Amino acid sequence: MRHLIDTTDISVAEVDHIINTALDIIANREKYREVCKGKKLATLFYEPSTRTRLSFTSAMMELGGNVLGFSDAASSSVTKGETVADTVRVIGCFADIIAMRHHIEGPPLDASMVSRVPIINAGDGAHAHPTQTLTDLLTITRELGHLDNLTIGFCGDLLYGRTVHSLIKALSRYEGTKIVLIAPDSLRLPDYIKHDVCEKNGIEYREVSTLEEVMGELDILYMTRVQQERFADKAEYERVKDCYILDTEKMALAKEKMAVLHPLPRVNEITKEVDADPRAAYFRQVENGKFVRKALIYTLLKWAEEGKEPLHNHEAAEVEGLVCPNKKCICNNEPVEYKFQLTEGGVYRCLYCSTKAE
Protein backbone atom coordinates (compact mmCIF):
# COMPACT_ATOMS: atom_id res chain seq x y z
CA MET A 1 0.00 0.00 0.00
CA ARG A 2 1.36 3.40 -0.96
CA HIS A 3 0.87 6.33 1.42
CA LEU A 4 2.17 9.90 1.34
CA ILE A 5 3.51 10.67 4.81
CA ASP A 6 6.75 12.39 3.86
CA THR A 7 8.08 13.98 0.69
CA THR A 8 10.57 11.13 0.32
CA ASP A 9 7.78 8.52 0.12
CA ILE A 10 7.61 9.20 -3.61
CA SER A 11 10.52 9.23 -6.04
CA VAL A 12 11.49 12.19 -8.22
CA ALA A 13 10.01 10.33 -11.20
CA GLU A 14 6.75 9.86 -9.29
CA VAL A 15 6.71 13.53 -8.28
CA ASP A 16 7.14 14.45 -11.93
CA HIS A 17 4.31 12.06 -12.84
CA ILE A 18 1.97 13.70 -10.31
CA ILE A 19 2.91 17.20 -11.51
CA ASN A 20 2.39 16.19 -15.14
CA THR A 21 -0.97 14.66 -14.22
CA ALA A 22 -1.92 17.94 -12.53
CA LEU A 23 -0.93 19.86 -15.67
CA ASP A 24 -3.06 17.48 -17.75
CA ILE A 25 -5.99 18.02 -15.36
CA ILE A 26 -5.63 21.79 -15.82
CA ALA A 27 -5.65 21.40 -19.60
CA ASN A 28 -8.34 18.70 -19.82
CA ARG A 29 -10.72 19.08 -16.87
CA GLU A 30 -13.63 17.19 -18.43
CA LYS A 31 -11.42 14.13 -18.90
CA TYR A 32 -11.11 13.72 -15.12
CA ARG A 33 -14.65 14.71 -14.08
CA GLU A 34 -15.73 11.18 -13.05
CA VAL A 35 -12.49 9.23 -12.64
CA CYS A 36 -13.20 8.79 -8.89
CA LYS A 37 -16.93 8.17 -9.19
CA GLY A 38 -18.06 5.89 -6.37
CA LYS A 39 -14.92 6.58 -4.29
CA LYS A 40 -14.91 8.32 -0.91
CA LEU A 41 -12.28 10.56 0.66
CA ALA A 42 -12.27 10.95 4.45
CA THR A 43 -10.80 14.21 5.75
CA LEU A 44 -9.70 13.82 9.37
CA PHE A 45 -8.66 17.28 10.53
CA TYR A 46 -7.58 17.44 14.17
CA GLU A 47 -6.27 20.97 13.55
CA PRO A 48 -8.03 23.97 11.96
CA SER A 49 -7.55 24.45 8.23
CA THR A 50 -9.05 26.52 5.45
CA ARG A 51 -7.02 25.98 2.27
CA THR A 52 -5.89 22.39 2.76
CA ARG A 53 -9.22 20.95 3.91
CA LEU A 54 -11.33 22.77 1.31
CA SER A 55 -8.73 22.00 -1.36
CA PHE A 56 -9.02 18.27 -0.66
CA THR A 57 -12.80 18.49 -0.57
CA SER A 58 -13.00 20.44 -3.83
CA ALA A 59 -10.46 18.12 -5.47
CA MET A 60 -12.40 14.94 -4.68
CA MET A 61 -15.73 16.47 -5.71
CA GLU A 62 -14.28 17.60 -9.05
CA LEU A 63 -13.04 14.04 -9.63
CA GLY A 64 -16.59 12.75 -9.17
CA GLY A 65 -16.06 11.31 -5.69
CA ASN A 66 -17.61 11.98 -2.30
CA VAL A 67 -16.19 13.38 0.93
CA LEU A 68 -16.83 12.56 4.58
CA GLY A 69 -14.97 13.23 7.81
CA PHE A 70 -14.60 15.93 10.45
CA SER A 71 -13.04 19.40 10.61
CA ASP A 72 -12.96 19.50 14.39
CA ALA A 73 -11.78 16.59 16.52
CA ALA A 74 -14.21 17.73 19.23
CA SER A 75 -17.02 16.32 17.10
CA SER A 76 -15.43 12.86 16.95
CA SER A 77 -14.74 9.99 19.34
CA VAL A 78 -11.33 11.52 20.05
CA THR A 79 -13.12 13.28 22.93
CA LYS A 80 -13.84 9.84 24.36
CA GLY A 81 -10.18 8.83 24.22
CA GLU A 82 -10.09 7.00 20.87
CA THR A 83 -6.56 6.77 19.46
CA VAL A 84 -5.50 7.80 15.98
CA ALA A 85 -4.83 4.15 15.07
CA ASP A 86 -8.31 3.03 16.15
CA THR A 87 -9.95 6.00 14.41
CA VAL A 88 -8.24 5.09 11.16
CA ARG A 89 -9.21 1.43 11.44
CA VAL A 90 -12.83 2.57 11.80
CA ILE A 91 -12.76 5.18 9.02
CA GLY A 92 -11.12 2.66 6.69
CA CYS A 93 -14.42 0.76 6.78
CA PHE A 94 -16.19 3.73 5.19
CA ALA A 95 -13.63 5.45 2.94
CA ASP A 96 -11.26 4.56 0.10
CA ILE A 97 -8.58 7.12 0.99
CA ILE A 98 -7.85 9.33 4.02
CA ALA A 99 -6.33 12.81 4.34
CA MET A 100 -5.22 13.59 7.91
CA ARG A 101 -4.05 16.78 9.57
CA HIS A 102 -2.93 16.85 13.20
CA HIS A 103 -1.57 19.42 15.63
CA ILE A 104 1.11 17.03 16.93
CA GLU A 105 3.88 15.21 15.04
CA GLY A 106 3.57 11.60 13.88
CA PRO A 107 -0.14 10.66 13.69
CA PRO A 108 -0.24 10.17 9.89
CA LEU A 109 2.72 7.76 10.06
CA ASP A 110 1.14 5.90 12.97
CA ALA A 111 -2.10 5.72 10.97
CA SER A 112 -0.35 4.34 7.90
CA MET A 113 0.96 1.38 9.90
CA VAL A 114 -2.55 0.04 10.50
CA SER A 115 -4.58 1.46 7.60
CA ARG A 116 -6.01 -0.65 4.79
CA VAL A 117 -6.51 2.46 2.61
CA PRO A 118 -3.99 5.12 1.48
CA ILE A 119 -3.14 7.79 4.06
CA ILE A 120 -2.19 11.32 2.99
CA ASN A 121 -0.39 13.51 5.49
CA ALA A 122 -2.13 16.89 5.28
CA GLY A 123 0.26 18.34 7.86
CA ASP A 124 1.46 16.96 11.20
CA GLY A 125 2.47 19.54 13.79
CA ALA A 126 5.74 21.24 12.95
CA HIS A 127 7.02 18.17 11.14
CA ALA A 128 5.93 17.76 7.49
CA HIS A 129 3.37 18.85 4.90
CA PRO A 130 4.04 16.88 1.70
CA THR A 131 0.90 17.93 -0.22
CA GLN A 132 1.85 21.59 0.27
CA THR A 133 5.23 20.62 -1.18
CA LEU A 134 3.57 19.14 -4.26
CA THR A 135 1.58 22.37 -4.50
CA ASP A 136 4.79 24.38 -4.30
CA LEU A 137 6.54 22.25 -6.94
CA LEU A 138 3.61 22.62 -9.34
CA THR A 139 3.59 26.38 -8.72
CA ILE A 140 7.32 26.69 -9.36
CA THR A 141 6.92 24.63 -12.54
CA ARG A 142 4.10 26.85 -13.80
CA GLU A 143 5.82 30.10 -12.81
CA LEU A 144 9.42 29.38 -13.89
CA GLY A 145 9.17 26.29 -16.10
CA HIS A 146 11.66 24.06 -14.28
CA LEU A 147 12.68 22.71 -10.86
CA ASP A 148 16.46 22.44 -11.26
CA ASN A 149 19.21 25.05 -10.92
CA LEU A 150 17.16 27.35 -8.69
CA THR A 151 18.14 29.59 -5.78
CA ILE A 152 15.38 29.53 -3.18
CA GLY A 153 15.16 31.81 -0.17
CA PHE A 154 13.15 30.63 2.84
CA CYS A 155 12.13 33.48 5.14
CA GLY A 156 10.46 33.62 8.54
CA ASP A 157 9.63 30.64 10.75
CA LEU A 158 12.02 27.93 9.60
CA LEU A 159 12.03 26.08 12.93
CA TYR A 160 8.35 25.16 13.11
CA GLY A 161 7.57 25.61 9.40
CA ARG A 162 6.57 22.13 8.24
CA THR A 163 6.07 23.42 4.69
CA VAL A 164 9.69 24.61 4.68
CA HIS A 165 11.01 21.27 5.94
CA SER A 166 9.09 19.29 3.32
CA LEU A 167 9.99 21.57 0.42
CA ILE A 168 13.71 21.54 1.25
CA LYS A 169 13.59 17.73 1.29
CA ALA A 170 11.97 17.73 -2.15
CA LEU A 171 14.27 20.34 -3.71
CA SER A 172 17.37 18.57 -2.37
CA ARG A 173 16.76 15.89 -5.02
CA TYR A 174 17.03 18.33 -7.93
CA GLU A 175 20.34 19.33 -9.53
CA GLY A 176 21.76 22.78 -8.90
CA THR A 177 19.53 23.71 -5.93
CA LYS A 178 20.87 26.51 -3.74
CA ILE A 179 19.13 27.46 -0.49
CA VAL A 180 19.23 30.72 1.45
CA LEU A 181 17.86 30.70 5.01
CA ILE A 182 16.52 33.99 6.38
CA ALA A 183 15.32 33.73 9.98
CA PRO A 184 15.85 35.11 13.49
CA ASP A 185 18.17 33.04 15.66
CA SER A 186 15.29 31.49 17.61
CA LEU A 187 13.51 30.29 14.44
CA ARG A 188 16.40 28.85 12.44
CA LEU A 189 16.09 25.66 10.42
CA PRO A 190 16.41 22.49 12.55
CA ASP A 191 19.84 20.90 12.49
CA TYR A 192 18.49 17.59 11.19
CA ILE A 193 17.31 19.29 7.99
CA LYS A 194 20.68 21.00 7.54
CA HIS A 195 22.75 17.88 8.18
CA ASP A 196 20.56 14.94 7.13
CA VAL A 197 19.05 16.64 4.08
CA CYS A 198 21.15 19.54 2.76
CA GLU A 199 24.65 18.34 3.61
CA LYS A 200 23.86 14.70 2.90
CA ASN A 201 22.67 15.61 -0.60
CA GLY A 202 25.41 18.14 -1.30
CA ILE A 203 23.01 21.09 -1.31
CA GLU A 204 24.62 24.50 -0.95
CA TYR A 205 22.97 26.57 1.79
CA ARG A 206 23.75 29.63 3.83
CA GLU A 207 22.10 31.63 6.61
CA VAL A 208 21.67 35.40 6.41
CA SER A 209 20.04 38.01 8.61
CA THR A 210 18.23 40.29 6.13
CA LEU A 211 16.06 39.98 3.03
CA GLU A 212 17.73 42.95 1.36
CA GLU A 213 21.12 41.29 1.05
CA VAL A 214 19.79 38.37 -1.00
CA MET A 215 16.68 39.57 -2.86
CA GLY A 216 18.59 40.14 -6.10
CA GLU A 217 19.78 36.54 -6.40
CA LEU A 218 16.58 34.63 -5.60
CA ASP A 219 14.53 32.74 -8.18
CA ILE A 220 11.97 31.86 -5.50
CA LEU A 221 11.23 33.66 -2.24
CA TYR A 222 9.26 31.43 0.12
CA MET A 223 7.73 33.61 2.82
CA THR A 224 6.25 32.06 5.96
CA ARG A 225 4.13 33.23 8.86
CA VAL A 226 5.59 33.23 12.36
CA GLN A 227 3.15 30.73 13.87
CA GLN A 228 1.78 31.95 17.19
CA GLU A 229 0.20 28.55 17.89
CA ARG A 230 3.63 26.84 17.97
CA PHE A 231 5.02 29.08 20.74
CA ALA A 232 4.90 28.10 24.40
CA ASP A 233 6.42 31.50 25.28
CA LYS A 234 4.11 34.26 24.04
CA ALA A 235 6.71 36.93 24.86
CA GLU A 236 9.12 35.27 22.43
CA TYR A 237 6.41 35.28 19.76
CA GLU A 238 5.84 39.01 20.24
CA ARG A 239 9.59 39.59 19.95
CA VAL A 240 10.02 37.85 16.59
CA LYS A 241 6.62 38.12 14.86
CA ASP A 242 7.54 41.21 12.81
CA CYS A 243 11.15 40.32 12.01
CA TYR A 244 10.63 40.12 8.25
CA ILE A 245 8.08 42.03 6.21
CA LEU A 246 8.11 41.88 2.42
CA ASP A 247 7.09 45.20 0.85
CA THR A 248 7.33 46.90 -2.54
CA GLU A 249 10.71 48.43 -1.68
CA LYS A 250 12.23 44.99 -1.17
CA MET A 251 10.48 43.65 -4.29
CA ALA A 252 12.23 46.41 -6.28
CA LEU A 253 15.53 44.64 -5.47
CA ALA A 254 14.36 41.29 -6.91
CA LYS A 255 14.85 39.79 -10.35
CA GLU A 256 12.32 40.62 -13.04
CA LYS A 257 11.60 36.90 -13.42
CA MET A 258 11.13 35.35 -9.99
CA ALA A 259 8.20 34.27 -7.84
CA VAL A 260 7.05 34.88 -4.29
CA LEU A 261 5.36 31.89 -2.65
CA HIS A 262 3.62 31.63 0.72
CA PRO A 263 1.71 28.62 2.12
CA LEU A 264 -0.78 31.05 3.74
CA PRO A 265 -2.43 32.28 5.86
CA ARG A 266 -0.41 35.46 6.09
CA VAL A 267 -0.61 37.94 8.92
CA ASN A 268 1.53 40.96 8.06
CA GLU A 269 4.70 39.41 6.63
CA ILE A 270 3.70 40.44 3.09
CA THR A 271 2.11 43.86 2.66
CA LYS A 272 -1.10 44.09 0.63
CA GLU A 273 0.66 46.29 -1.93
CA VAL A 274 2.81 43.35 -3.01
CA ASP A 275 -0.33 41.47 -4.12
CA ALA A 276 -0.46 43.57 -7.30
CA ASP A 277 3.07 42.55 -8.33
CA PRO A 278 2.91 39.88 -11.09
CA ARG A 279 5.67 38.00 -9.29
CA ALA A 280 3.37 37.46 -6.28
CA ALA A 281 2.27 33.88 -6.92
CA TYR A 282 0.73 32.90 -3.58
CA PHE A 283 -2.92 33.09 -4.61
CA ARG A 284 -2.20 31.18 -7.83
CA GLN A 285 -0.39 28.75 -5.53
CA VAL A 286 -3.66 28.11 -3.66
CA GLU A 287 -5.47 27.00 -6.82
CA ASN A 288 -2.51 24.85 -7.81
CA GLY A 289 -3.06 23.03 -4.51
CA LYS A 290 -6.45 21.85 -5.70
CA PHE A 291 -5.06 20.62 -9.02
CA VAL A 292 -2.14 18.74 -7.49
CA ARG A 293 -4.36 17.13 -4.84
CA LYS A 294 -6.68 15.96 -7.60
CA ALA A 295 -3.66 14.37 -9.27
CA LEU A 296 -2.47 12.84 -5.99
CA ILE A 297 -5.84 11.34 -5.02
CA TYR A 298 -6.29 9.89 -8.50
CA THR A 299 -2.75 8.48 -8.53
CA LEU A 300 -2.84 6.95 -5.03
CA LEU A 301 -6.18 5.26 -5.73
CA LYS A 302 -4.76 3.80 -8.95
CA TRP A 303 -1.66 2.59 -7.13
CA ALA A 304 -3.88 0.98 -4.46
CA GLU A 305 -5.78 -0.92 -7.16
CA GLU A 306 -2.49 -2.01 -8.73
CA GLY A 307 -1.05 -3.09 -5.36
CA LYS A 308 1.99 -0.86 -5.81
CA GLU A 309 4.58 -1.44 -3.10
CA PRO A 310 6.02 1.39 -0.93
CA LEU A 311 9.13 3.13 -2.19
CA HIS A 312 10.71 2.35 1.17
CA ASN A 313 9.57 1.10 4.55
CA HIS A 314 9.70 3.29 7.64
CA GLU A 315 11.94 0.78 9.35
CA ALA A 316 13.02 1.56 12.87
CA ALA A 317 14.07 -0.08 16.09
CA GLU A 318 13.19 0.19 19.75
CA VAL A 319 16.36 1.15 21.61
CA GLU A 320 16.44 0.44 25.31
CA GLY A 321 16.95 3.55 27.41
CA LEU A 322 16.20 6.06 24.64
CA VAL A 323 13.14 8.30 24.57
CA CYS A 324 11.80 11.02 22.30
CA PRO A 325 11.98 14.35 24.20
CA ASN A 326 9.41 16.05 21.95
CA LYS A 327 6.29 16.59 24.04
CA LYS A 328 4.30 17.18 20.85
CA CYS A 329 5.18 13.80 19.32
CA ILE A 330 2.51 11.12 19.13
CA CYS A 331 4.65 8.71 21.14
CA ASN A 332 4.33 11.07 24.12
CA ASN A 333 0.60 11.64 23.67
CA GLU A 334 -0.84 8.22 22.79
CA PRO A 335 0.09 4.61 23.65
CA VAL A 336 2.67 4.40 20.85
CA GLU A 337 6.04 2.76 21.43
CA TYR A 338 9.22 4.77 20.98
CA LYS A 339 10.90 3.90 17.68
CA PHE A 340 14.11 5.34 16.29
CA GLN A 341 16.10 5.48 13.09
CA LEU A 342 19.89 5.60 13.07
CA THR A 343 21.14 8.34 10.74
CA GLU A 344 24.35 8.17 8.73
CA GLY A 345 25.88 10.53 11.27
CA GLY A 346 25.32 7.99 14.04
CA VAL A 347 22.43 9.87 15.66
CA TYR A 348 19.21 8.16 16.72
CA ARG A 349 16.14 10.18 15.70
CA CYS A 350 12.49 9.55 16.50
CA LEU A 351 10.72 7.75 13.67
CA TYR A 352 7.61 9.89 14.10
CA CYS A 353 8.98 13.44 14.47
CA SER A 354 12.72 13.27 13.62
CA THR A 355 13.71 14.69 17.01
CA LYS A 356 17.10 13.57 18.35
CA ALA A 357 16.63 10.82 20.92
CA GLU A 358 17.74 11.23 24.52
Image (cartoon, grey):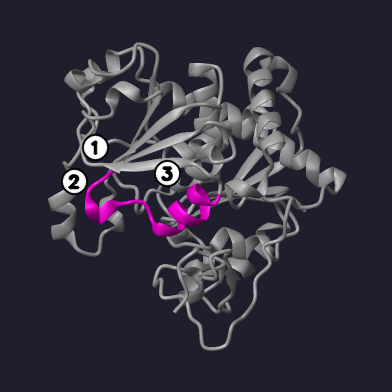
Is 268 positioned to the left or the right of 206 in the image?
Answer: left
The local crowd at label 2, few if under 14, some if 14 to 19, many if 20 or more residues have their Cα within 10 Å, is some
| Residue found at x 47% / y 27% | 150
In the picture of the structure, the residue carrying the numbered disc 2 is 241
Q: Which residues are magenta?
A: 182-200
Mark 3, residue position? 164
Residue 191 is inside the magenta segment: yes
Indicate the amino acid at tag 2: Lys
Q: Amino acid at mark 3?
A: Val
Decide which of tag 3 and tag 2 comes sooner along the chain.
3
The span from disc 3 to disc 2 (Cα, nearest Å) is 17 Å
Q: Secondary structure at mark 1?
A: loop
Q: CA distance from mark 3 to mark 1?
A: 17 Å
Which quarter of the rendered picture does the C terminus lie within? bottom left
**In the rendered image, is residue 327 in sight?**
yes
On screen, residue 124 above or below 78: above
> Which of pointers 3 and 1 lies earlier in the amino acid sequence?
3
Mark nearer the viewer, 3 or 1: 3
**Foreground pick, 70 / 280:** 280
